[in-house]
Image (tube, helix red, strand yellow):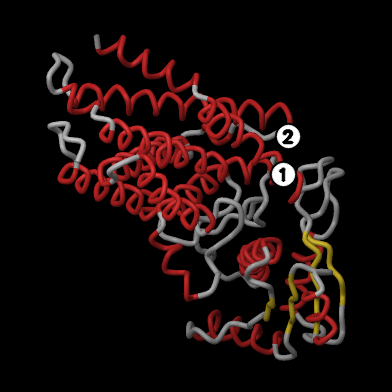
Amino acid sequence: MKTNLFKALLISNIREKEVLFWIFAFPILLLTIMIIIFSNMEGKDINFKVALIDKGGEGMGTEILGTVLDGVSKPQDGKTPLFTIVNVEDPEEARQMLMDQKVALVIEIPEDFNVKFNQVVFFSKITGINADSPAVKTERVALRSSSSFASNVFNQIMAAVNVEAAKKMNVKLMDYDISSEILGQTDDFSWADYFLAGVLVMSFFSTGFFALGNDISHNKHIGVMKRLSATPLSVKRFMFSNILSKMVIMIISAVLLLVFGHFVFGSSFTILNLETFPFIILGILTALSFGIFIGSVSKNANAASAIGNVLFFPMQFLGGLYFPVWDISPAVRWFVYINPMTYIAAGMRQGMGIMDAPVPAYTLYLVPLAWSAIMLVISAFTFDWRGDAS
């Protein structure tokens, strides 16, 4: 009976026009729109145009930094270089170029760069005392995705500069490794991979918030739960079958999205690797827990939709699904750090090798799991298992 009920609920859900569009078709449509807007359709390479203000002059420090910048601004094996360097003398001109979106980032090497670099080498190598490191100034537009990306990549380039300096000056290396990942780009990086992770998380939570949440509240409102209490079929068994059917719908939607992204836009299947797959499971479980919560606290489907909309849209757009959110205004940054979508999407992209999450690794699991536990505990106390429709 349990298997038959699950099949009946699954088939019933799939036949609904709303499910066919919002759960299956809409994620594919959204992925298509995001890729068309944010990437060129001919290639998969990233290229950031950067304004460079070099006031450092000649010296070992600027020589090492210049070597690394030259390496990431020259095509290799026919691939588009990571950076396109535009040398600018006037800082105001560079800032205007940044504001006019002609460049994604402004990098300024100060006049005292070589002096501080030499001091670092001397004090660390001769006396063993740490000195102030030479600073490179960068300017960006925090809410512009390309500018935030370029800034994150440049920070990793500076790690490569430290490695190069350590090699040249015979300073003992820490746990650094020069590779393409340090420069912020994998060989198979594409905007399709980046947006695939975000849209996948969106589809999970859309199913949980609206399909599952509305289903539970609607069944309560029309008295399905109450009627079940008078039959051999328990409310718990019905709930389990309903939740399981929504989980299968999420998996079907994810498979369709992965296949479409791969064959239409050339996205990879790295999202299924061992480092990323746990976040897929975590995303499904967290989305289901929110759906159970919404259905438990809502008296009817209209109330469930209202609660779902209030929660879903800010969580979606402040969860880093479509653009970087770690450096947005402090007034709303707190929401980014408590948002489970933020950590699930960041964990997926880190596992795929797209970009590192700027938070401790354990928080990528802890925050979504904590939210799941909270939602389920509240649901357990608020849901009327006797089936009352009040």
User: Where's the C terminus, which quadrant?
Assistant: top left
Confirm or deny contact between disc 2 and disc 1 (CB under 8 A): yes
x and y, in percent, of residue 366 in the image: 32, 52
Please, what secondary structure does the residue beneath circle 1 have?
A: helix
Q: Nearer the viewer, residue 132 or 382?
A: 382
Horizontally, is 189 left or right of 229 in the view?
right
Q: Is residue 220 above or below residue 354?
A: above
What residue lies at 39% left-to-right and 28% top-to-bottom?
A: 247
What residue lies at 74% left-to-right and 82% top-to-bottom?
A: 109
Q: Is residue 115 above or below residue 356?
A: below
Q: Nearer the viewer, residue 111 or 317?
A: 317
Horizontally, is 234 left or right of 91 in the view?
left
How far apart marks 2 and 1 lie (CA) works out to 8 Å
Please, what secondary structure does the residue beneath circle 2 have?
A: helix
* Crowding at mark 2 (Cα within 10 Å: few <14, some 14-19, many 20+): many
User: What label sits on residue 35 in the rendered view?
Assistant: 1
**Residue type, label 2:** Phe
Q: Is residue 300 above or below residue 185?
A: above
x and y, in percent, of residue 179 in the image: 64, 51
